[in-house]
Amino acid sequence: MAEDFIIDQTLSKEEKYQLLIKQLHALIEGEPDVIANLSNVTGAIHQSFGHLWTGIYFVKSSELVLGPYQGPVACTRIALGKGVCGTAFKSKESIIVENVDEFPGHIACSSLSKSEIVVPVFSNNKVHSVLDIDSTSLAAFDNTDKSYLEEIAKLIEDKII
Ligand code: SME
């Protein structure tokens, strides 16, 4: 079954996201376990694009706490308001960072990370978690990523959490 989720790397970014979103619906269909579903969602995004790191941080009390992810080991806890993840939590907005060295307070979990996108996931109008993706390339993420990842965040809100 895992082979069904390999995306053709010759597709455009838009085509990859469109296929990925269809696959995500199929992947989570009928499975009620949140951790299992978020593990597969992060795995499918990661595998489709070959990112450095793709994962979820959950909002817990006054911190973000590491959830399901794919990639190198990462910071376990991030204070709300700190780093790109904590800033996205606070602003309730997606953040695209073209060059992590130019983002004040960026938290470097891996020295290989050059650019990043963080998208909040909502539940009852509150930020429930953030979806964080890192790339080894500068400026890897743009408004196309933001728009499709926000659609995936909505899918997580509506169908998973
Ligand atoms: N760079 C993030 C920290 C998490 S890691 O990238 C996995 C940040 O600044 O919040």
Image: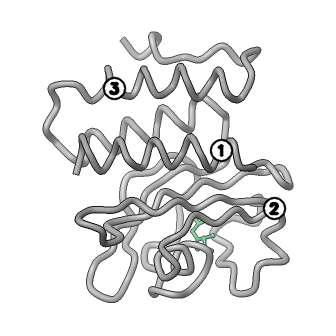
Above/below status of 54 relative to 79:
above
Q: Which mark is residue 25?
A: 3
Three-letter code, disc 3: His
Task: Identify which residue, 111 or 131, lies in the foreground.
Answer: 131
Q: Name the residue nearer the viewer: 157 or 9.
A: 157
Which residue is rendered at x = 83% and y = 66% of the image? 99
Please, is residue 150 above or below residue 91 in the view?
above
What amino acid does circle 1 point to?
Asp
For the residues marked 1 and 3, what is the alpha-carbon distance in whole angstroms? Answer: 18 Å
Residue indicated by mark 1: 145
Assess disc 2: are there few (<14), some (14-19) or many (≥20) residues with their C-alpha within 10 Å of its C-alpha. some
Query: Which label is found at residue 98?
Result: 2
Question: In this rendering, is residue 93 above or below 119?
Answer: below
Q: Position of residue 55 (x, y in %)?
A: 48, 53
What secondary structure is found at the residue carrying circle 1?
A: helix
**Three-letter code for the amino acid on which mark 2 is drawn:** Glu
Q: Position of residue 56 (x, y in %)?
A: 43, 58
**Quarter of the rendered structure image containing ligand 1:** bottom right
Q: Mark 3 packing: few (<14 Cα in 10 Å), some, or many (20+)? A: some
Residue at image coords 39%, 59% = 121
Which of the 4 quarters of the picture holds residue 149?
Answer: top right
Looking at the image, is 56 positioned above or below residue 105?
above
- What's the CA distance linking mark 3 and mark 2? 29 Å
